[in-house]
Image (cartoon, rainbow, N blue to C red):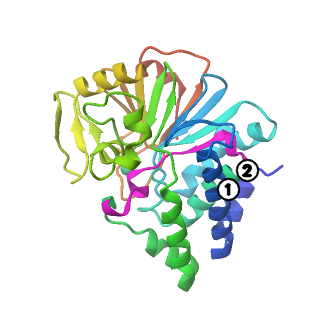
Amino acid sequence: MMKAYELIERARSISADDLLGVIDEVERLISDEIRGSGRLRLRGRLIYIPPAGEAAIIGDLHGDIESLKHILVDSEFVEKASRGEDARIIFLGDYGDRGIHSPEVYFVVLSLKAMFPDRVVLLQGNHEGPPDLLAHPHDLPYHLQLKFGGEWSRVYDALCNLFRRFYTAALVPGRFLMVHGGVPAGITGVDDLAYAYQRHPSESLLEEILWSDPRDGISGVLPSPRGAGRLFGEDVTSAALEALNVKFIVRGHEPAAEGYKFNHNGKVLTLFSRRGPPYYNIQGAYLMLDLNEEFKSAWQLEGYIRKF
Ligand SMILES: [Mn+2]
């Protein structure tokens, strides 16, 4: 049985071909899932998570291999999944850029997917977005060059190709929604999440899901200082929760001092699971949840947030 720390140690000495191998494997796996041959319940790029078992939910990692190591050791996900326990790990996107260990983080996250396909969910972040919506600075190419020298571009092309297959959203029916950034204003139902990737760029659904941020004290939407997505108010969140028949949203995308924060009167929980520059947060955090339990508000999740 592979231990979490062994996987992390392996990641430190990988070659370009090692990473390319696992990218290819995960690309095949997700393509099969999308075609419906897996055991996962999907609709377009929306994945349904059954309300059973345990889930570790992880926010932005941005090339921070030490935080990922901490989360894997602390959650015991690899050990539990190896024993066949009903354990899941759900990543909310933004695996690379901003931290020099982006290649290692991708290797570990993709290896987990290859090892436990039905138990690992990889959502798309704005740093895994479509080519016309690239995040800046986008320093993944530089980190790949540092690690792999002249072979960097083959790895980069394969990764960008894989990003297009990552899921847009995960939904625990009747309970809560998981996305990277936010909910689109005026969302009418699950198809606005499931098929956002097909309706991009003629509609702004995917841009808002990957880029938007909740703001307290505003109504409707405002332009975002990020230059993409929107700032959305509590009324937008409430309408989305009603359209999707869920109680709250768990998302990443924004740093917070203690690694997590609440917005919109407990309707939105933000998780940020990496530490160190260029971000100011003192702690990172992730969520460890028993999916059998039902919560009325994200505020009730506070006791399940693990800070580090
Ligand atoms: Mn982000």
Residue at figure coordinates x 36%, y 53% from the top left: 279
Whether residue 300 is in magenta: the answer is no
Task: Give percent across and percent down for residue 42.
Answer: 56, 37
Residue at figure coordinates x 39%, y 49% from the top left: 198
Q: Is residue 172 left or right of residue 12?
A: left
Whether residue 120 is in magenta: the answer is yes
Vertical position of residue 105 compared to residue 117: above or below: below
Amino acid type at image mark 2: Met
Which quarter of the picture shows residue 304? top right
Vertical position of residue 256 compared to residue 274: above or below: above
Q: Is residue 263 left or right of residue 144?
A: left
- In this view, the residue in front, 71 or 142, is 142
Q: Is residue 221 left or right of residue 306?
A: left
Q: Which residues are magenta?
A: 115-132
Q: Is residue 205 visible?
A: yes
Measured in 3D between alpha carbons, the distance from the residue under mark 1 to the one under mark 2, in whole angstroms, is: 6 Å
| Few, some or many residues within 10 Å of mark 1 (<14, 14–19, 20+) | many
**Residue that numbered label 2 is attached to:** 115
Amino acid type at image mark 1: Ser
**Residue that numbered label 1 is attached to:** 111
- In this view, the residue in front, 276 or 249, is 249
